Image (spheres, helix red, strand yellow):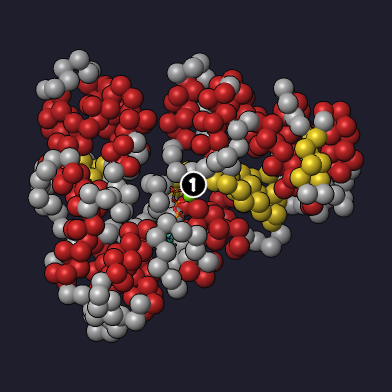
Amino acid sequence: MKINPGGTLALEDIVGRDALVQDICARLDQQSVVLVAERRMGKTHVLAKLSAEAPASWVVFRRDVEGVRSAAEFVQTIVADLHPHLNASTQFADWIKARAADLGGTKIGPLTLPNFQGKHWKQALCDTFDHVQSAKDLTRVVFLWDEIPWMIQNIARADAQEAMELLDVLRALRQQHAKLRMVFTGSIGLHHIVRQLKAQGYTNAPTNDMAAIEVTPLDAPDATRLANKLLQDIGCDTQNSTLAADIAQAVDGVPYYIHHVLSDIAKRRNAQAVPTRTELRQQIRAAIQSAHDTWNLKHFEERTQAYYGSQRDACLALLDGIAAAPNRLDVQTAINGAKASFPGIQQNDWLELVRLLERDYYLLRDPDTGQLGFKFSVLKRWWQWHRLSLPIMVEGAVP
Ligand SMILES: Nc1ncnc2c1ncn2[C@@H]1O[C@H](COP(=O)(O)OP(=O)(O)OP(=O)(O)O)[C@@H](O)[C@H]1O
Ligand SMILES: [Mg+2]
């Protein structure tokens, strides 16, 4: 297994996620799914594992749709995916030819895909899934669409109405076709895109028929196993050492950061020597403090611009106050701390902001006390250093 922070892993290098994939498959038996998680948590690799391990009787298509710019182009990808599976048992190939003759086509390999310009894409989607419905050998068709929020945003930039219609048509198809399942995921929350569409008049709830399943950090045994495997890769003998468990704990079990820690360990002159706890603590601290942002943590501050718009400054004030506090804060105490600088913001809007920050994985409320804190200690430490110029107070779990 190779250290690979942020790259594409071979299937056998995807650690853990077995229970999650089983869970998603069980849910997909009943309904479609939105996979939600913080950025870089491992969603794309969960999709990879899911497409490899789904029941053999399912036909699963996995696509990154980030580059798709119109509903017509999106429908073309669906037609291209289904074509080999529908060709034998239905009149789908004839339908494709006839549509391409009517509308003009784009040749992709041996296939000429119709150009579903104007509103033709809607009818084409309905026709396509009618073919799926009548194909007796297809019992379950599952589309795994990665980066679908980006796609909807791309489409909305050119034509907001088309983005709204596409979301609605996909929902209608899920209602109409018992064989059809969809999995939506992406590195930005779909709720932000829907919120932007709502500001332009959209009134529907396009995913309220789908189950939301969260991709969480790896649990402690899997996170430790990942750290151990990567330590072995660089020849670091960790027998009788708690190093792997310490790494896993110190970065909240997030596999992306575990790869990064190992990458930093491997860069040392004496890569095979087992670092002491103090060395590990210093190394992680240096990565978080780095002005070069090697772990890509600045993104969590930068994206507040796009996510919170005119409320950005209030949101940052709230997060600053919570990062500065040594312990979790009561919700009202946190709000009061930020409120002084923003007297125009009403209580309800503060509460909505807190809820959004929870939904976007910045904050977490203690289930017993209701108190607010950062969800991930890595981000809290980044915030303390880079925004508040504080020494890093929380050192994660490495004693
Ligand atoms: N199960 C895993 N086992 C080992 N490493 C993993 C696992 N999941 C994720 N990683 C590591 O984290 C990195 C990011 O994973 P991935 O691209 O799947 O996240 P993502 O949630 O799709 O990110 P984004 O939100 O940017 O799309 C991978 O390149 C890899 O280094
Ligand atoms: Mg991804």
Judging depth in this view, the residue of 106 and 65 nearest the camera is 106
Q: Is residue 250 toward the left or the right of residue 177 in the image?
A: left
Residue 340, given in percent of the width and then of the height, sits at 11, 22
Q: Quick check: can you spot residue 121?
A: yes
Residue 172, given in percent of the width and then of the height, sits at 65, 31
| Furthest residue toward front | 269
Q: Quick check: can you spot residue 175?
A: no
Residue in the picture at 16% in, 33% down: 334
Q: Mark 1 is on which residue type?
A: Leu
Judging depth in this view, the residue of 248 and 358 nearest the camera is 248
Above or below, 229 against 164 in this view is below
Residue in the picture at 37% in, 73% down: 230
Above or below, 179 against 235 in this view is above
SS at badge 1 = strand
Above or below, 156 against 224 in this view is above
Residue in the picture at 12% in, 30% down: 337
Residue in the picture at 53% in, 25% down: 157
Judging depth in this view, the residue of 219 and 389 nearest the camera is 389
Q: In which quarter of the image is ligand 1?
A: bottom left
Q: In which quarter of the image is residue 333?
A: top left
Quadrant showing the C terminus: bottom left
Residue 93, given in percent of the width and then of the height, sits at 86, 44
Say which residue label 1 marks: 35
Q: Is residue 271 toward the left or the right of residue 91 in the image?
A: left
Q: How crowded is mark 1: few (under 14 residues within 10 Å), some or many (20 or more)?
A: many
Judging depth in this view, the residue of 28 and 397 nearest the camera is 397
Q: Is residue 84 toward the left or the right of residue 393 in the image?
A: right
